[in-house]
Image: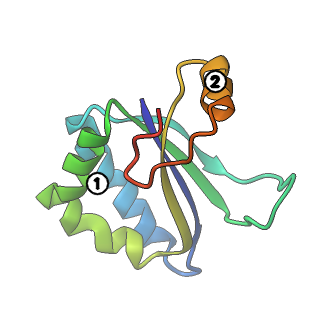
């Protein structure tokens, strides 16, 4: 599974624009079998300097599904709704290990992260 971490702030006065993006992106996510794992407001920062108001975790079956969505014409048409209503946007795609022990094995092998996304 691929999980996309979205952290961002809404530009004051652009709330309605971002709400329109959310209304329109749902059916597009459905087309690519993406699932909203979590979507909400940040309530507390425990550690670090990441202060964005909103957090979204979107799950995809594969990187190919994520790539296909990002090239979808309808998605590309609504991207300005998102991009022009948000700031401080962090978007990161994460490939899940099957278990925490798999992460331990990977780390103990001393493998370096691969920017192409093949970290297993």
Q: Which mark is residue 105?
A: 2
Residue 71 relative to residue 41: left or right: left
Residue at (83, 56) in percent of width and height:
45
Percent position (x, y) of residue 74?
A: 15, 58
Residue 97 relative to residue 30: left or right: right
Mark 2 or mark 1: which comes first in sequence? 1
Work out which residue is located at the far right of the displayed protein and give it. 46
Between 119 and 32, which is closer to the camera in this rendering?
Answer: 119
Percent position (x, y) of residue 118?
A: 40, 41
Work out which residue is located at the far front of the displayed protein and give it. 109
Q: Which mark is residue 104?
A: none
Percent position (x, y) of residue 65?
A: 25, 39
Residue 47 relative to residue 74: left or right: right
Percent position (x, y) of residue 47?
A: 86, 55
Residue at (60, 30) in percent of width and height:
106
What residue is disc 1 on? 24
Q: Secondary structure at mark 2?
A: helix
Quadrant including the N terminus: top left
Q: Looking at the picture, does residue 88 appear above or below residue 61?
A: below
What's the CA distance linking mark 2 and mark 1? 41 Å
Mark 1, other Cα within 10 Å: few <14 / some 14–19 / many ≥20: some
Residue at (51, 31) in percent of width and height:
96
Q: Secondary structure at mark 1?
A: helix
Quarter occupied by residue 103: top right
Between 43 and 17, which is closer to the camera in this rendering?
Answer: 43
Colour convention of the picture? rainbow
Mark 2, other Cα within 10 Å: few <14 / some 14–19 / many ≥20: few
Q: Looking at the picture, does residue 107 appear above or below residue 68?
A: above
Residue 112 relative to residue 29: left or right: right
> Given this view, does label 2 or label 1 mark the residue nearer the observer?
2
Q: Looking at the picture, does residue 37 appear above or below residue 100?
A: below
């Amino acid at each position: 599974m691929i999980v996309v971490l979205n952290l961002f702030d809404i530009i004051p006065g652009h709330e309605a624009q971002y709400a329109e993006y959310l209304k329109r992106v749902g059916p597009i996510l459905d087309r690519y079998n993406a699932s909203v794992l979590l979507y909400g407001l940040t309530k507390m920062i425990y550690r670090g300097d990441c202060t964005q108001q909103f957090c979204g975790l979107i799950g995809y079956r594969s990187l190919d599904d994520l790539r296909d969505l990002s090239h979808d014409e309808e998605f590309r048409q609504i991207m300005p709704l998102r991009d022009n209503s948000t700031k401080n946007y962090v978007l990161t795609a994460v490939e899940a290990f099957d278990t925490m022990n798999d992460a331990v094995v990977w780390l103990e092998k001393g493998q370096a992260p691969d920017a192409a996304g093949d970290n297993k």
